[in-house]
Image (cartoon, grey):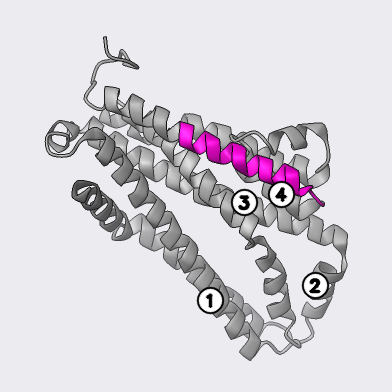
Amino acid sequence: MNKSVVVVRKTFKKRVTSKSFLITMFLPLIFLGFIIIFVVYSNQNMNFAMIENAINNSQEVREKIIPIFSTLIIFLFIGSCANIIAQEIGSDKGSRLMEIILTSVPPERYFIGKLVGVFLIGLLQLIGYILIFLIGIRIFDSIDQNGGSMTQIFMSLAEVVNIWNVLFLILGIISYTTIAAMFGSLVTKKEDVSNAANPILTVALIGLYIGLWLANTSPNSLVVKVASQLPFFSPFVMPARLASTNVDNGAIILSVVLLLFYSVISILISMRIYNKNALNFSEKLIFRKN
């Protein structure tokens, strides 16, 4: 178990200190700074209250904005984590480091360690963004000259942070990163690492399309109802449906159960494939021992 912890620690430390991670954490702060400057120096006659009333009082506007916002946030987190894990495992194998690593760490523990490390990175990003969001609300509350309208606008967007959305986000990260890690283990050349996560991200893009457009315009259509139950698409579609219309609790629970079951099966299958192909550098894939 200690070896898995070492893998988790190294993966976490490597990514947290990377330039890409620091950029993704500082960009929201920069964006927040621009908004603050805009609010402070904008024309005082600008009617932020009108925007607030449009969001809070118009059900149609809320049904358009909240689903789009929640679906995009979930897609960005899942896509980021899936791409990170595919590159982590793919680069180790493509550079032949796996031949050295797996002499001291069993493949299963290394695989789980990488998954947990990337999951913690995603969790840290989520906590960081929530803190930035809360800080922004406090700042707007103190400087807003428009009766707190900007604060209320941000509070309306905060509706995306609810127990169901967080649950679908966590399970979506687990399922997609697991499959992405499997694709990363199939890489045989270092130059192919950047494309390792493309197959699973293509599937995610389909889910994003359904969540952004179909679930936003026709949340009760047959396509959307079916997609909200399919584990490939439910992390994107079900949160959009929840924000657009009333969904039966039984349908929500069934979607969660199916996604949870799919996540467990994905871990078991991906771990098995990884175990067989971690040291396989030929073009022929191995799915079982002879």
Q: How far apart are marks 4 and 2 (CA)?
A: 22 Å
Q: What element carries label 3?
A: helix
Residue stretch rendered in magenta on the structure: 246-265
Q: How far apart are marks 1 and 3 (CA)?
A: 22 Å
Q: Can residue 106 be seen in this view?
A: yes
* Whole-percent x, y for residue 122 in the image: 43, 55
Q: Is mark 1 on a helix, strand or loop?
A: helix
Q: Which of marks 4 and 2 is nearer the N terminus?
A: 2
Within 10 Å of disc 1 (Cα), the crowding (few <14, some 14-19, many 20+) is few
* Whole-percent x, y for residue 276 in the image: 28, 22
* Whole-percent x, y for residue 221 in the image: 83, 36
The amino acid sitting under disc 4 is Ala
Q: Can residue 186 be seen in this view?
A: no
Main secondary structure found in the magenta portion: helix
- Residue 168 lies left or right of residue 64; in this view the side is left
Q: Does the magenta stretch include residue 186?
A: no
Q: Distance between the residues labelled 1 and 2?
A: 20 Å
The amino acid sitting under disc 2 is Ile
Are the residues at dot 4 and dot 2 in contact (C-beta closer than 8 Å)?
no
Q: What element carries label 4?
A: helix
- Residue 108 lies left or right of residue 29; in this view the side is left
